[in-house]
Amino acid sequence: MAFSLKLNGTTHEVDAEPGTPLLWVIRDELKMTGTKFGCGVASCGACTVHLDGMPVRSCQTYIEDVADAEVTTIEAMSETDIGAAVQQAWVELDVVQCGYCQSGQIMSAVGLLSENPKPSVEDIDAYMYGNACRCATYQRIRAGIQRAAEILEA
Amino acid sequence: MTLDTTRRTFLKGAAATGAVLLIGVRPDGALAAAGDSAQFNPFVKIASDGTVTAIVKHVEFGQGPATGLSTLIAEEIGLRMDQIAYDFAPSNAALYNNLAFGPFQGTGGSTAMANSFQQYRTAGAAAREMLIAAAAQEWGVDAAELSIDEGVISGAGQSAPLGAFVAKAATLPAPEAPRLKDPSEFKLIGNPDIRRLDSAIKGDGSAMFAMDLHLPNQMVAMIKRPEQRGGLATGFDDSAAQEVKGYIMSAVLPNNAGVAVYAETTWAAMQARDAVEVEWDLSAAETRSSDEIEAEIRAALDAEPTYNVNKSDQAATQALLDGADQVLEQTFYFPLLAHAPMEPLNCTIEATEDGGIRLHDGCQLPTGPHMALSQIFELPMEKIEIKTMLAGGSFGRRATPDADYQVEAALAFAVTDRSRPVKLVWSREDDLRSGYYRPAFGHKVKVGLDAEGKIVGWDHRIAGQSIMKGTAFEEMMVQDGVDHSSVEGASDTPYQIPGAFFGLTDTEKATSTLWWRSVGHTHTAYVMEVMMDMAAKGAGQDPVEYRLSYLTGGADQDRLRGVLELAAEKAGWGNAPAGHAQGVAVHKSFGSYVAEVVEVSGSAEEGVRIEKITCAVDCGLPVNPDVIKAQMEGGIGYGIGHVMRDRITLTGGAVDQYNFPDYEPLRIGDIAAIDVHIVPSAEAPTGVGEPGTPPAAPALANAIAAASGDLRVSSLPMDENGVAFA
């Protein structure tokens, strides 16, 4: 079935069956691989993308449900002030280790800072709970979000 | 790194665009340089435009070798970190072997920096001397007057970028013993401000993991495996799968280990696999449950051990215990654990233009799959090419002695007409259920104390499933029947314990056993450090002081004292805020010394919250201090998360857990803060990937005991054994 998908400012015509997770449309059809497959059950957050600016798990979001929405992936994050600040903070603090979950971490961090420009540690822990990192980079994720908030305030 | 270019064509291309200086080591160990990659495989490649590339022989899965080995080269040549790039070495055990593994290329045992430190510095130093020699000839000056700084050769009134001398340097003989820089000259090694080379690409989505590879015309294969290990596929019905758009075909793997289901996309492969019905022969399949495994281990602890590990006098230990003023006894049980790296296992296999096979993989032990593929495809080793890509974590899982997932992919490719590349993809369910685990272990320890609280005897029985027996590593790792990985960290403890006996009994394997971040130390450190804590308590002494009194008489002990004292000082040992309690552990593993103090609030009954973990590490000369800190932070988190709430259980041979909801990872709020301190050292660098893990769990257990009326958690995970977490 043909769907039209607005992603990172471009409209793509994709051929997919209803019920296909957005994750696999992005990765296998559009071949944009910054969005990761980690669990497939919305339990790790590696596949996080934005739907009209709100973080969602793309492994549990279906192609037929995003027709009218604007989808944003990690590949477009540097184009927003908040995304660029988070990416800068991530590099300054060397947040990443293996890096496989970090696209999702950054997408969630941007979601948090969009709603809450000065999150407390408690705010961060609550908002980022669903993004797992098996390397346990959590302490730097926390620091990275606080650093990004500082960059944005400056 | 470009994905669509093979290393061979890349080098050819580089050579065509200009002179390339390659510095490497010949198989005989002598330094060699050449302008042609066909003759010498390099650790460092320098193009005439000045581009320097470190050829990294270790896989990068977050532990930092891409940055670390590049730092060594950049330091010795005289570069800024933004003047060096890295590429992963091809599979070639003669050139890129791990010096700790013998003739075998691979990453493991926290050896990447330890075995590369001299090798990569020497390669960088040789490059520096050859470039300087070329410049000296060109300018007609004395080489002794020249130096390289930030990629520019200068001295004797001259100055030019090093790229200008690559062509000439490539014609010069390699120095036999290049001068390594004195530590006083270091600008990069030991510099805490050096950043990772792979941060930016991992933050903008451009980093390419093996999972991200998409070769033209590829098929995605997923394997339908038996629920019980050892089950065999005898046939299948794919009529329902035919309804899945993008489904291509299914095939029984040649070893009957499962059915490969092929589709055009990953999602189609997942759906088709669900739809395929497989006929299984379960006559030889595992049927035991984890309760039976545990019962077997506990029974073994109560019987006479098979092996007397240190060939010590068991009767003498018993006599000492009989005469002790008090005997502390504790039995421990450690469940099966999965590694669950963030990137589910995958790899891609394709036929090459010249009749060979190419494997694209986040490959941890290239020599293993290289040999396996050579056998499967009946091709000489040189016809097999392995392209190592970034790997999304491993924690041991990618380093199977039997190259399990690469063999699966090879078989899945072999049964096709081989015209299309096959990308094997595992799901998270496959990852948790497919059978390679930290083995289950039990320990039973009796510690005798005299009236002053001094240890007079220590009887320590270990029973569990050997990792090394039955693998290619048996010859190296098993001596007189004792698998060292079953007892490491206990029977070789640096504590000066009198009257010690260590016994070992192997129990039957119900799953495949596999090293898991820090291997035997995952359980031995827990037992040693909880028992030392109980002994300190029994003696009525401070747990730090008590440990220090058993750490005397040698370099190991001095370095353990160093980290223990530093961690205690930085943690404010003994001065926890009201309502908080502290626990400590110190352990040597992989040549490194780590002490950790865990501070908790609450109690086992009310709910424990981990407020702060303070860590001190001595890993010799710290090459990338911030990477070392990150590895301690990560190693601690990995250890803590699993003991809090993770275990793999079996019912009738089938794994009960399916995905992260019931193998719950450490989450961001679980540890409020981690504070890492590095002991300055001029000793040779040692491991950092694993050593942060062993002390974390026992330090937590000891903190919980301090907070909870001396409750000793001796079976794991903690949340199923009397500990609630806030």
Image (cartoon, coloured by chain):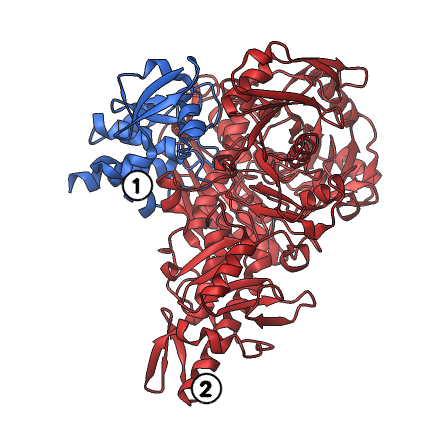
Chain colours: A blue, B red
**Picture layout, residue A14 above or below residue B484:** above
Residue at image position (57%, 29%) is B219
Task: Please state the total of marks drawn on the protein image.
Answer: 2
- In this orientation, does residue B147 appear? yes
Between B617 and B517, which is closer to the camera in this rendering?
A: B517
Tag 2 residue: B137
| x then y, percent, for residue B471 | 76, 39
* Residue B10, image x, y percentages: 51, 56
- Labels 2 and 1 in the same subunit: no
| SS class, disc 2 | helix
- Above or below — where is A86 with respect to B188? above
Mark yes or no: residue B224 visible: no
Q: Is residue B173 above or below residue A37?
A: below
- In the image, taking residue B423 as reference, residue A71 lies left or right, namely left
Find residue B41 and report its horizontal and vertical position in percent: 60, 62
* Residue A110 appears left or right of B79: left
Instruction: Write down the residue under mark 1.
Output: A87
Position of the C terminus of chain B by quadrant: top left
Please name the amino acid that badge 2 sits on: Gln
Q: Chain of mark 1?
A: A
Mark identifier at residue B321: none
Crowd tier of the residue under label 1, counting other residues whose Cα lies within 10 Å: few below 14, some 14–19, many 20 or above: many
Query: Which residue sits at x=38%, y=23%?
Result: A14
Closest to the observer, B580 or B390: B390
How many other residues sit within 10 Å of disc 2, few (<14), some (14-19) or many (≥20)?
A: some
Q: Give the label, 2 or 1, closer to the camera.
A: 2
